[in-house]
Amino acid sequence: MTNLVTEVADTVSSTPDSVALSYDGTEQTYETFWERTGQFAAALNDRGIGEDDRIAIYLPNLPQFVTAFYGALRTGSVVVPMNPQYKAREISHLLSDSGSKAVVTLSENAEAVAEVQPETDVETVVSVGAPVESATDFEEFLADEMVPVVKRADDDVAVQPYSSGTTGQPKGVLLSHHNLASNTRSNTALLEPSINHEDNLIGTLPLFHIYGMSAVMNAAVFTGATYYPVAEWDPKVVFDLIESEAITVMYGVPAMFNDMINQPNADEVDLTSLRFVNSGGSSLPMEVLERFEELFEISLFEGYGLTETSPVTHANRPSARRKGSIGQPVENVDAKIVDQDFEEMPRVEEGPIDESEVDLDDVVGELVVAGPNVMQGYSGLPEANERAFTHADGKRWFHTEDLGYWDEDNFVYIVDRENHMIITGGYNVYPREVEELLYEHDAVADAAVVGTNDDRRGETVKAFIVPAPGYEPGVDVTEEAIKQYTLDNLAEYKHPRIVEFRDELPRTTTGKVQKYELRNDS
């Protein structure tokens, strides 16, 4: 029997006076933090909320998120994290589908909760911020007493996040206590030495997303480190925080690192307190990686994971790294590249490969993974669960739907999402390859490549470009210049036949380009 919170209880016992949370000049020791989680748990119990009940947390990165998260788990409840940028229409599905009985929300979002509440099972609404009539203030909600940690089985569900839903309604992902605990332990061990009580972790990744929740928040409180939540991404604020608080560990997404290298004063910032910086969430352009390392003189390690895998499956680390790769599988995770018949694809000797020597189509397959971090399944979706898994070799393999290849040292190289691949005139085009080239152009600050309908070719390649500062579309950089640049560097069928300049690209809160929006606009 286990409970994710048991790991935190052990930390509190060993480091009660250490700082657990630091936000906006206010600190909470582990002892104080633990007391507040117990008071939150007791308040839930007072309202008849307990084991297996769903508790939605609809907050940005604030100390109250951390308190509510571990407080809910203390009662055996299941946390349903929700993007604080969602509107009423979007949270209606999440609350209804999960059957959440309580919601912890920002005061400014309480109206959205009230709007959909009659259609849901929500009985209790707790708000953070200015008082609102439809909710109980967070501090007033806390009980005077604490309750003990409820025992849970390894495979009992702890968190029910929702997939991004790029191809339909978001799916509830059932992650158990063991899923999250095992993956958090694997992540903390990537560093040398492992994350420990002397580390300061900056919370730039949103806590509603499993990446920020597991790889950062859980990693901090499991090890007695200090967690610095950042409520809203701002590279200038992050620069100041890293310097003033001697931040040692940062996890982010490529869009964040791209923002950092494009700040006007980036070459004046001192980030040398950082001993580990990790990029995940989407593919990291090589140009961004190399510019980051050149500017700040620290290594940027790329990793990989999915909501369904708690999330990390692969990572580069100080002891084993290849640029352009997502790394090797983390501890206890198995992975392989397979074809449509679930047969292993041949390995290359060492990646990344030179396409003039190896045809991508001869080595690229789907990445599948197995291990204790892999989800229990999607909530209430038996058909989706059947499609998601293949049982083979005594293991339960999860289909990531990401395409890539592997080398003899078990490093994996992601080429693209399966549903992003463009087939033009019978040829396969992997958008990431074109995007990598575009990032190398001086006039390009951001880029995305999609397929758009073409009567003759089936699909044709279209590039969306955000010009770098100082480059005016049509004057300093033109559509024809971008096309010629790609023609000079790639096979003819891969070059974008359409180029569109944008002020910005549509992105999710976690930094992924919303390619379905770009395709819909084409």
Image (tube, grey):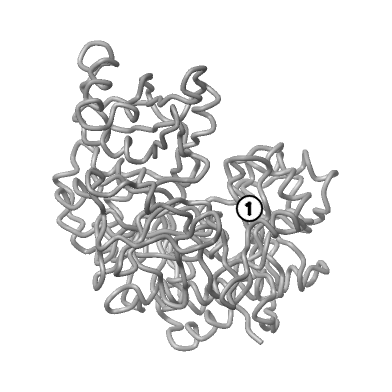
Q: Tell me where residue 373 appears, x and y as whole percent.
A: 54, 71
Q: In the shown orientation, is residue 298 left or right of residue 27? A: left
Q: Which residue is depicted at the point 33% across and 36% down? A: 435
Closer to the camera, 198 or 53? 53
Q: Residue furthest top?
A: 475
Above/below status of 521 relative to 306: above
Q: Residues within 10 Å of mark 1 (few under 14, many from 20)?
A: many
Looking at the image, how many numbered discs can be counted on the residues? Answer: 1
Closer to the camera, 140 or 426? 426
Residue pointed to by mark 1: 162
Q: In the shown orientation, is residue 511 left or right of residue 409? A: right
**Residue 280 lies in what quarter of the image?**
bottom left
Q: Tell me where residue 399 appears, x and y as whole percent.
A: 56, 58
Above/below status of 351 relative to 468: below
Q: Which residue is depicted at the point 23% across and 21% down? A: 484
Element under disc 1: loop
Give the amino acid at mark 1: Tyr
Q: In the shown orientation, is residue 513 left or right of residue 87? A: left
Q: Tell me where residue 263 appears, x and y as whole percent.
A: 24, 38
Q: Which residue is depicted at the point 26% across and 36% down? A: 437
Above/below status of 168 relative to 160: above
Q: Which residue is depicted at the point 66% across and 87% down? A: 1
Q: Tell me where residue 229 appears, x and y as whole percent.
A: 44, 58
